[in-house]
Amino acid sequence: MCPNRHFLLISFCLPLLAAFLVNPLRLNAANDSAVECVVLLHGLARTSASMAEMADALEATGYRVSNIDYPSREKPIAELAPLSVNEGLTHCRAQGARRIHFVTHSLGGILVRAYLATTTIPELGRVVMLAPPNRGSRVVDEFADFPGYELLNGPAGFQLGTGPDSVPLQLGPANFEVGIIAGDRSINPVLSTAFNEPNDGKVAVADTVLEGMKDFLVVHHSHPFIMQSDEVVRQVIFFLANGKFDHTDQ
């Protein structure tokens, strides 16, 4: 005669129930330890909508995502950094994240650098910076005195040049695991007059480099849309998983 189905069910469930009564968190421990969250930080004069495609791809891969919308044109970098990063950390921690990554565009990368220069993130995972002005942008040097520049770019826009007031140049080398993707195509012929070398219309390829970076990749995309490229999204996901970019086809 076959054993009663209810008896088998009870026999199977009792040990699990006992474990739960002893430690109610135990059953979720394995899942909790696997939770990884990615904070997305957009660039200057942009919004979180510019990172929406990246957010969708990361969520489809299994990451929790915190796509932060911060007032990039209203405050200097010293205020934007804790404002944006702390919001992302709070959101990720509320989701139970045990590891927190960052994917940034342009100014967003400088905000992460400024934050990590003074503050430790215990759960910090990997960082991918897209088109970051790590050595400043010569566009700021050339166009900051033009009428309307402050209206379009705010206080932080004046802090991203290559001169003595440059915030990126005052920050030290990376003391965290970071990969950088630079673009070498411009769709802005006016701003590109600030360069005589490969650039994305806002930042020279050479000025995205950061001492201490783990990997570096150049793609044929422009500054405003680099984060929306399928190739770039794929490389971001690859770096978050492996700590390096996929150079197979490079």
Image (tube, grey):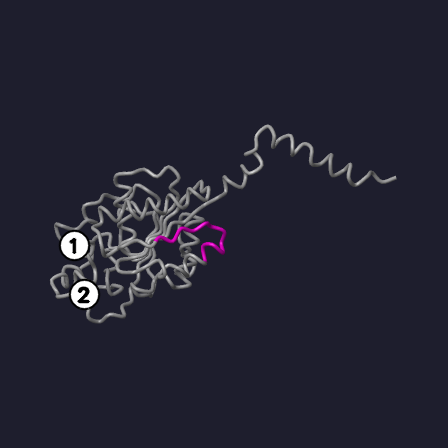
At 22% from the left edge and 45% from the top edge, which residue is drawn?
171
Query: Is residue 156 located in the magenta-colored stretch of the structure?
Result: no
Q: Is residue 221 above or below residue 22?
A: below
| Quarter of the figure with residue 182 | bottom left
Q: Nearer the viewer, mark 1 or mark 2?
A: 1
Cβ–Cβ under 8 Å for marks 1 and 2: no
Q: Is residue 199 above or below residue 126?
A: below
189 with respect to 229 (left or right): left
At 39% from the left edge and 39% from the top edge, which residue is drawn?
123
Q: Is residue 85 above or below residue 148?
A: above
Instruction: Check disc 1: other Cα within 10 Å, few if <14, some if 14-19, many if 20+.
Output: many
Residue 199: horizontal and vertical position, in percent?
25, 63
Query: Is residue 67 located in the magenta-colored stretch of the structure?
Result: yes
- Tell me which amino acid carries mark 2: Asn
At 49% from the left edge and 56% from the top edge, which residue is drawn?
60
**Quadrant in which the C terminus appears:** bottom left
Secondary element under disc 1, as helix, strand or loop, is: loop
Residue 175: horizontal and vertical position, in percent?
30, 41
Residue farthest toward the top in the current orientation of the protein: 22
In primary-sequence order, the first of circles 1 and 2 is 1
At 82% from the left edge and 39% from the top edge, which residue is drawn?
4
Label 1, label 2: how far apart the Cα atoms are: 15 Å
| Quarter of the figure with residue 237 | bottom left
Q: Mark 1 = which residue?
A: 162
Q: Mark 2 = which residue?
A: 196
Residue farthest toward the right in the current orientation of the protein: 1
Part of the protein shown in magenta: 57-68
